[in-house]
């Protein structure tokens, strides 16, 4: 395991930001840490980097304890903070060179690396402009470059898509996937935006009030939440109470609701084929039939609405 | 005297006898000293008194009977001294009228007693008084000088004066009149050829006089001013002062010593030659600077052993070559000037600016001084290094700014 | 050491910053003018005793301008505060702090690097100004300083550096204490004004309370009044610096106030060797260094314990 956290507790004054967190991330994974603001994601990340001391719990990152040996951890971990900041009066190249120097990369070597990573994130053209003139999306991409420059084993990206337009966010996410593919980097991604995590993450952990409340692949999570039954939604032209009654009679169907010409069904298993046949037999026109409750957002909402 | 006069005398004698008995004596004619002793060559001078107690003014004629070669006569007692033959007397006078009887024994007169009968009488003979004076002539003669000295005495407190050439000699002389009469004293003097002399009263120095009146037994002070010729050489000169009042005369030997004059002068080269250094010179710190000055003597005699002193600021060295000038002759031409080279060295750490120093030349007879202003300029060598340091620092800082500021 | 990287980066930032350039040239021009006038007045009235005359360039005011020393003691703090007041809080507000600290460097390297960069900037500026004064002096006076003068000028440089270092440390401390750079700057300026202007008044008031004096008081009471005032004043780094520099730049200074000097008229006035001069103001020197160290020490501890997250 590249990252392993057991029983992590961290409190700011009276408030417990992290309360007994267990987390494991394997080498080469893209792990999404999900949760609303204030659920303890950033605190967890800071502990992983050794920037904050935990009150209790065991933490291992790249085989080292970040509290005791922060430098060894930091050498192998790249970090893109939420709302990443740069020295605005310096150019992208200068900002990156500073980071390279702090990592002990000689200027000769860093020169090529900087060009390389700037190309990767698509900032070659503005490389010698002061960062103060950059847009939010360019800064975020520069942040990725900032992580890449040190060629980390583990990249921790805290809310990387915050505040960027959807197109930019998509580009960024593609870039992250590329990072893993090209360099075999492990990536820990925190976000409160589900669809992004869902799109690129191998595994997802959902944090709530300092605890990991659910963990697994997106599908596993879907299955977990789906354990209580399957929800179907059907759009039927000319649907009436008769159809609802008929559907209710199908084996495995627990409940049927009719709302605005839409039918919502709850069943023990996936009974879409039976439902379709029945609707057609009843002489109605089936316009759409889909299974609900499988997206992460639905899972997510399920946790946090409760 | 005619017959009628004799008759008159007789009548007068009767009347006077009468009046003497009835009215008392209206006229007294007498002297306090009816017998006097006089030495040969000296004059008899007796106060004779006339006291009149009558009621109307009278004229009294005076006559004397005695040896005619003694030249007996009456004179006034006060000034002016004139010979008189009659006296006008006013009534009610309480004091007697004083006149003087004088007689001088002829040189050949033998010693012994001589009788003079002095008579005062009104022309009408109504009043007549006479008395006899006995003069005893002492035969042995006194030396004349002593006599005169006693009569006209000259006193000078400083008979010998010493002065530099060109200066005047002023003697203050006291003239005492030992006679019983006021005297007008003629003043004369003898001085070397070309010298000028004159007299003034003591307290009126603007008034030049040739004689002075000295009252009887009185004293007058006069100034005797003697001006030597401008080129008079140094040395001792004698001057004679003479005073003469009638027959009396006296003289004084006075001494005048002329010493040389000394006037030391300092001049810069510019003052002498019209070019070269004035009293303002420029110098550089730590570097010797030579300055030429000349010693002159506007006096008449050489000045000896001239040394130099200077109140140089701390750390300065000022040297004179020669250190001592043995003699500075009176300056007649440029050749007489003595050249002195002054070597001035400001200290290494002299701050640029103006420095004032006073050079004093002191000889035995005179001294002179002059202010020398030395303007010290910064040594340009160090100045350029200073500029270099500033330029270097500005360049270095700019370099750092450029290098660090732009990366 | 990664501290070198931080150091050079900060040094470049400080030198590149417009505020530093402006203030540096302001001080340079004013100081240059002060020294030029001091040199002029030395030329107009050349002192008979030219020993330590170079030092007078620093201490002699002329033409209505105060001396360079006064300028340094008054405006130097501003330079120090200016370099330090946003050292840390600006990194927090720009969001660079977590990014930089996520790099493999120790936290103290970062704060030390910042402090040292500030100190080096001040040293370079001060050395530059002193060298320029030295050059101007060389030009105006035309002779080089002697060993004693050089030693004292160098000591003065070190002293000035410690003094400016104190204000830099104070500025950095405020940059940690205050989130907003503006608050930090205001606090720094407040402290500066307090020590440079109001502290004299305050010390006078305290002395008036403890040892009241009237115009006709005996000199002993005045001396006591002055002693109390001086004691209070020594709590101010400005006073410490001024006393220490007086001993360094005026070799005849023997640590006596005006009244004390009047009471002891037989104190010799010959110049002291540098060691003796330093001995006189040893407590002031130690206090000044200690103040700087304490100030930076507090900053250090505060920064080390500061949560990166607590923006």
Image: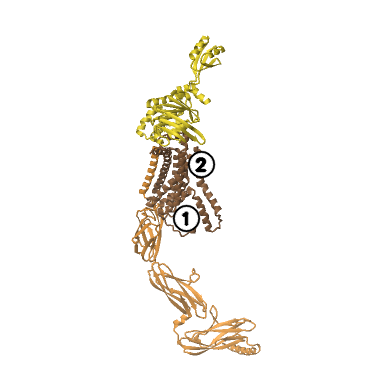
Chain colours: A yellow, B orange, C brown
Both labels 2 and 1 in a single chain:
yes
Q: Residue A149: x percent and y percent? A: 39, 31
Q: Position of residue C95 (x, y in %)?
A: 46, 33
Q: Which residue is mark 2?
A: C187
Q: Nearer the viewer, residue A292 or B264?
A: A292
The residue lying at 57 percent from left, 84 percent from top is B49
The vertical placement of B337 against A265, above or below, is below
Which subunit holds the residue at mark 2? C
Q: Calculate the distance from the C-alpha at mark 2 to the C-alpha at mark 1.
A: 34 Å
- Mark 2 falls on what kind of element? helix
Name the residue that disc number 1 marks. C256
Q: Position of residue A148 (x, y in %)?
A: 39, 29
Is C254 or B66 nearer to us in this picture? C254
Q: Earlier in the sequence, mark 2 or mark 1?
A: 2
x%, y% of residue C280? 44, 54
Can I make out residue C96 in this image? no
Above/below status of A292 relative to B185: above
Q: Kindly tell me whether residue B18 is visible in this rendering.
A: yes
Q: Secondary structure at mark 1?
A: loop
Crowding at dot 2, Cα within 10 Å, few <14 / some 14-19 / many 20+, comes out as: some
């Amino acid at each position: 395991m590249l990252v392993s956290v057991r029983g992590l507790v961290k409190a700011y004054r009276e408030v417990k930001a992290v309360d007994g967190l267990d987390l494991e991330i394997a080498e080469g994974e893209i792990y999404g840490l999900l949760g609303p603001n204030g659920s303890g994601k950033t605190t967890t990340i800071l502990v992983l980097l050794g920037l904050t001391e935990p009150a209790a719990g065991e933490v291992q990152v790249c085989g080292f304890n970040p509290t005791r040996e922060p430098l060894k951890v930091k050498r192998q971990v790249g970090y893109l903070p939420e709302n990443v900041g740069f020295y605005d009066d310096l150019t992208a190249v200068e900002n990156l060179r500073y980071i390279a120097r702090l990592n002990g990369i000689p200027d000769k070597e860093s020169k090529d690396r900087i060009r390389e990573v700037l190309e990767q994130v698509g900032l070659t053209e503005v490389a010698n402009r002061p960062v103060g003139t950059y847009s939010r999306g360019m800064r975020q991409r520069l942040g990725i470059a900032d992580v890449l420059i040190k060629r980390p084993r583990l990249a921790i990206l805290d809310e990387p898509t915050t505040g960027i337009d959807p197109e930019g966010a998509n580009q960024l996410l593609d870039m992250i996937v590329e990072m893993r593919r090209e360099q075999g980097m492990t990536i820990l991604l925190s976000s409160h935006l589900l669809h992004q995590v869902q799109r690129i993450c191998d595994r997802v952990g959902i944090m709530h009030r300092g605890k990991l409340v659910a963990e697994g692949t997106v599908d596993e999570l879907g299955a977990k939440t789906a354990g209580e039954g399957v929800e179907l939604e059907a759009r039927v032209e000319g649907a009436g109470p008769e159809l609802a009654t008929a559907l209710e009679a199908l084996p495995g169907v627990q409940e049927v609701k009719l709302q605005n010409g839409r039918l919502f069904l709850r069943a023990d298993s996936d009974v879409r084929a039976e439902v379709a046949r029945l609707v057609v037999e009843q002489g109605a026109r089936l316009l759409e039939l889909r299974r609900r409750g499988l997206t992460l957002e639905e899972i997510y909402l399920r946790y946090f609405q409760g | 005297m005619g017959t009628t006069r004799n008759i008159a005398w007789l009548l007068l004698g009767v009347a006077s006898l009468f009046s003497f008995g009835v009215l008392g004596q209206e006229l007294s004619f007498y002297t306090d000293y009816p017998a006097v002793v006089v030495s040969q060559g000296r004059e008899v001078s007796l106060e004779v008194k006339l006291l009149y107690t009558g009621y109307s003014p009278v004229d009294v004629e005076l006559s004397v009977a005695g040896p005619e070669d003694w030249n007996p006569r009456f004179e006034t007692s006060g000034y002016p001294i004139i010979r008189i033959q009659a006296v006008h007397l006013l009534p009610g006078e309480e004091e007697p009228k004083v006149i003087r009887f004088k007689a001088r024994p002829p040189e050949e007169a033998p010693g012994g007693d001589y009788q003079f009968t002095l008579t005062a009488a009104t022309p009408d003979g109504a009043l007549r008084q006479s008395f006899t004076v006995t003069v005893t002539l002492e035969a042995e003669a006194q030396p004349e000088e002593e006599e005169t000295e006693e009569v006209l005495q000259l006193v000078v407190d400083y008979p010998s004066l010493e002065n530099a050439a060109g200066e005047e000699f002023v003697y203050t002389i006291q003239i005492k009149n030992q006679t019983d009469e006021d005297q007008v004293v003629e003043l004369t003097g003898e001085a070397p050829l070309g010298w000028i002399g004159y007299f003034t009263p003591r307290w009126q120095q603007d008034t030049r006089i040739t004689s002075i009146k000295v009252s009887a037994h009185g004293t007058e002070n006069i100034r005797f001013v003697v001006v030597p010729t401008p080129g008079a050489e140094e040395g001792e000169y004698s001057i004679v002062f003479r005073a003469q009042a009638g027959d009396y005369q006296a003289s004084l030997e006075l001494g005048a010593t002329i010493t040389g004059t000394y006037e030391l002068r300092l001049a810069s080269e510019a003052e002498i030659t019209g070019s070269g250094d004035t009293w303002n010179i420029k110098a550089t710190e730590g570097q010797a600077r030579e300055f030429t000055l000349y010693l002159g003597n506007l006096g008449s005699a050489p000045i000896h052993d001239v040394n130099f002193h200077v109140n140089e600021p701390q750390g300065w060295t000022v040297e004179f070559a020669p250190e001592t000038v043995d003699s500075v002759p009176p300056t007649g031409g440029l050749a007489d000037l003595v050249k002195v080279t002054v070597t001035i060295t400001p200290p290494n750490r002299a701050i640029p600016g103006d420095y004032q120093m006073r050079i004093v030349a002191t000889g035995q007879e005179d001294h002179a001084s002059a202010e020398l202003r030395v303007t010290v300029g910064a040594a340009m060598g160090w100045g350029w290094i200073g500029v270099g340091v500033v330029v270097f620092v500005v360049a270095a800082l700019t370099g750092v700014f450029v290098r660090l500021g732009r990366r | 050491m990664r501290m070198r990287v931080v150091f050079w980066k900060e040094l470049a930032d400080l030198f590149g910053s417009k505020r530093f350039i402006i203030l540096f040239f302001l001080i340079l021009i004013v100081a240059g003018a002060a020294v030029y006038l001091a040199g002029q007045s030395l030329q107009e009235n050349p002192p008979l005793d030219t020993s330590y005359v170079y030092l007078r360039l620093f201490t002699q005011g002329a033409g209505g301008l105060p001396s360079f020393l006064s300028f340094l003691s008054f405006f130097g703090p501003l330079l120090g505060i200016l370099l330090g007041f946003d050292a840390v809080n600006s990194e927090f507000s720009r969001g660079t702090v977590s990014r930089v600290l996520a790099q493999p460097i120790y936290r103290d390297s970062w704060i030390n690097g910042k402090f040292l960069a500030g100190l080096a900037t001040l040293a370079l500026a001060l050395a530059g100004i002193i060298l320029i004064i030295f050059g101007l002096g060389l030009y105006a006076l035309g002779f080089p300083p002697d060993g004693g003068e050089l030693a004292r000028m160098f000591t003065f440089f070190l002293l000035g550096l410690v003094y400016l270092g104190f204000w830099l440390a104070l500025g950095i401390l405020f940059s940690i204490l205050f989130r907003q750079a503006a608050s930090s700057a205001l606090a720094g300026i407040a402290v500066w004004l307090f020590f440079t202007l109001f502290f004299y008044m305050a010390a006078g008031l305290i002395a008036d309370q403890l040892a009241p004096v009237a115009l006709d008081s005996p000199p002993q009471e005045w001396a006591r009044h002055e002693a109390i005032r001086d004691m209070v004043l020594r709590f101010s780094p400005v006073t410490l610096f001024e006393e220490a520099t007086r001993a360094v730049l005026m070799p005849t200074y023997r640590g006596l106030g005006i009244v004390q000097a009047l009471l002891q008229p037989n104190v010799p006035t010959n110049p002291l060797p540098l060691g003796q001069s330093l001995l006189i103001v040893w407590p002031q020197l130690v206090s000044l260094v200690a103040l700087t160290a304490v100030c930076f020490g507090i900053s250090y501890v505060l920064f080390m314990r500061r949560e990166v997250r607590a923006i």
